[in-house]
Amino acid sequence: MTKAVLTISSKNYGAWALRGWLMAKLVELDFSEQVISPDDPAMRAEMLLLSSSIRVPALHHNGIDVWDTLAIAEYLHEIRPDAGLLPADPVARSHCRSICGEMHSGFGALRSSLPMNIKARSPGFKVWSRAQVDIDRISTIWSECLFRYGGPYLFGARPCMADAMFAPVVTRFITYDIALDPACAAYCQTLLALPALQQWIEAAIAEPEEIDELDAEFSTARVAVRKAKRPAVWWTAGRRFLVGVVGFELTTPCTPCKCATRLRYTPKTVIVGRKPGFSPGGQNFSDLEQFLPDLAPVRAGGNRG
């Protein structure tokens, strides 16, 4: 039997890769890792479009190719039904599938404003209101599961698919210093203590590659939004900018225009433009202002994407 191969992306930034990898570990699948380059379009799609509908992670096993995290989860459950990736009780199993689906398709504001970055620490991080709504919903999911199934994991005594799906969220809450109630905080520590997750985190910390966009774009946007009477700037994968009015939030992923986010409730002015050769890495906000008049307008008025 040929050894399985799991294709993953960056361990520091790759939230979807972590989910697939952790599930494979939970069912004790013997697999090797194929890590794609930071310059690979598939990795940049995962990192910058924040989309689950891509082909990373991908599992090759016994001549079968499976991609998309939920598809990998269901496949692993089929080949290792006794591993406990899904609860045995049908009611609990349906509940588990439901919250996994919610994690898979929802929480766009959280993904946009709190990207996974295991190496980083942002004490006192300012959480925007829509991201806080996502955080509150996740806390509710965790609290209900811990109360209903007795913990220490979401569905009882052993980690399952749901824990793997929420593992990247746990790392985000640590990175961005998110305040949680005692039960949810204890759950985070329980999940972080998993040997498999510890292995992933150690590898993420040791990872040599850095993707400058991922560190620069979010810090640039946060600085811009906090400045009074100044435009908000967002740098996207295609070296585009969204410019809008301060006080309005950068929110959900915007797949059609390939940018990482969009401005919410901008009343009049949104300009999408390019500044060739410009990278915000190492720039402060004052440096950015000089580029704003030179942006070539592509579209103005209303929200973009």
Image (cartoon, rainbow, N blue to C red):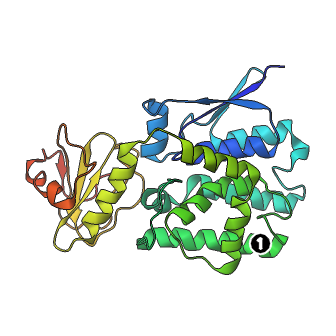
Q: Is residue 278 left or right of residue 99?
A: left
Q: Residue at x 46, y 70 (%)?
A: 123
* Residue with the mark numbered 1: 146
Quadrant location, the N terminus: top right
Quadrant housing residue 96: bottom right
Could one spot residue 70 in this view of the protein?
A: no
Give SS at disc 1: helix
In percent of width and height, residue 149 lies at 83, 70
Count the labels in the image. 1
In percent of width and height, residue 127 lies at 43, 71
Q: Is residue 253 left or right of residue 149?
A: left
Could one spot residue 152 in this view of the protein?
A: yes
**In the rendered image of this protein, does residue 122 appear above or below residue 205?**
below
Q: Between 164 and 257, which is closer to the camera in this rendering? A: 164
Q: Is residue 230 left or right of residue 144?
A: left
Q: Residues within 10 Å of mark 1 (few under 14, many from 20)?
A: some
In percent of width and height, residue 291 lies at 12, 51
Residue type marked 1:
Leu
Q: Residue at x 38, y 51 (%)?
A: 215
In percent of width and height, residue 273 lies at 19, 46
**In the rendered image of this protein, does residue 29 appear above or below residue 141?**
above
Q: Is residue 63 left or right of residue 272?
A: right
Q: Between 286 and 207, which is closer to the camera in this rendering? A: 207
Q: Between 257 and 141, which is closer to the camera in this rendering? A: 141
Quadrant housing residue 239: top left
